[in-house]
Image (cartoon, rainbow, N blue to C red):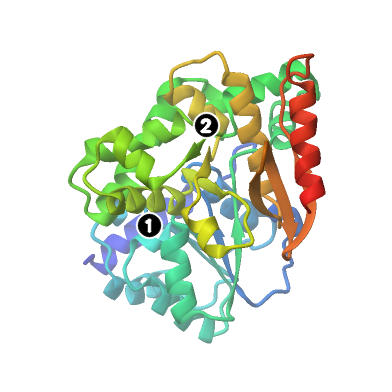
Amino acid sequence: MLLKSDIEVAYESQRLDIAVKRNAISRKYLNQYAATSSHIEIVSGVRRCGKSTLLLQLIQQKFSGSAYFNFEEPQTFGFEKNDFSKLFEVMGNKRKAYFFDEIQTIEGWEIFIRSLHDKGKKIFVTGSNSSMLSKELGTRLTGRYLQHELFPFSYSEFLVYLHLKNNSKNFINYLNTGGFPEYINQRRKEILHQLFRDILYRDIAIRYGIKNKYELEQIGLFLLSNVAKETSFNSLKKILDFASTTTVSDYVGWFQDSYLLFLVPRFSYSAKSMMINPKKVYAIDTGLIKANTLSRSDDVGRLLENAVFLHFRRTKFKINYFKGKGECDFILFDKNKFVGAIQVCTNINSENKNREINDLIEALNFF
């Protein structure tokens, strides 16, 4: 619990820091935002992908004079749900909008947000854990919110950010660098090393009370090293010598909740088969993969496939992969209707041409 005076100091300190960097680019969400919406706006995404900057851009461009509070700042340590009433007193009752950054770290946040919404306030919330946000939103805020996802920079945003032209050299640069703004600016690998550890320890280990942090890091690094490959909970248990598949399942679920990793299921008309068949794993960012894993001869191929996955993950499409006699990398559905099949290759040559095309045609014929 914090004193009101402590909250006031933290709020004023953050208010003075509200300034967008000169080279911050306009994200897709900002361009599409409808200022007339009365819903609570929820922006979720991996840490350090630009959520805070997005809020500050919204304040600067559309909601000047609004209230902003970041719950991950050191001054907010010890903040509890009973402190929300003090925070609102400090912010004041007549703000144009209220912005809350990483609010899911505070138990009972959704009750406070609902009370503000009931008062007719415009509210923006960010968070780096999709499951925790969804759980509270579903129980307390049904029908009252719109949820959006923010990712690290796409390739097109990368080009705009660095004022580059679209060519193969810059695309390879993007695959190796990824889209985290801080790393793009400084190109120091320790930034992505620390980001990986922050996700593991702050977003997962502390939040879920995990004592065996070595196991958590071991499975995280293994999956990052094997993006674009099939995996299953049982195979991970055997390879990493874990005690149970339940532990593996929990860890992988938490990786997905924190936006570190994604699992793509093999297509089947049977829900049970979809659940038990091996899944392919992808990561939130190609630069994060490159910085935290050993270089391999197939780096460009797997990074390219991961980048293609992220491109479609940003869209409304549901993604599977297809496996029959051969394998097709991505099958896309829109509202359960098949819309396309994607095969990813860095090179087409005499050795792989027939295989890659035939595997693609097999998937197309199936649908």
The residue type indicated by label 2 comes to Glu
Q: Position of residue 38 (x, y in %)?
A: 65, 77
* Residue hosting label 1: 71
Q: Can you tell which mark lies on residue 182?
A: 2
Quadrant containing the N terminus is bottom left
Mark 1–mark 2 Cα distance, whole angstroms, equals: 20 Å
Q: Is residue 78 left or right of residue 293?
A: left
Q: Position of residue 228 (x, y in %)?
A: 56, 34
What residue appears at the point 79 percent right and 22 percent down from the top-left corner? 353
Residue 257, quarter of picture? bottom left
Q: Is residue 190 left or right of residue 178?
A: left
Which residue is more in the foreground, 247 or 256?
Answer: 247
Which residue is more in the foreground, 202 or 247?
Answer: 247
Q: Position of residue 107 (x, y in %)?
A: 31, 69
What residue appears at the point 32 percent right and 47 percent down from the top-left corner? 248
The residue type indicated by label 1 comes to Phe
What residue appears at the point 41 percent right and 64 percent down from the top-left corner? 132
Note whether 263 is above or below 7 in the view shown.
above
Note whether 84 is above or below 18 in the view shown.
below
Residue 6, quarter of picture? bottom left
**Mark toward the start of the polypeptide (1 vs 2):** 1
Q: Can you tell which mark lies on residue 235?
A: none
Q: Residues within 10 Å of mark 1 (few under 14, many from 20)?
A: some
Q: Is residue 148 left or right of residue 293?
A: right
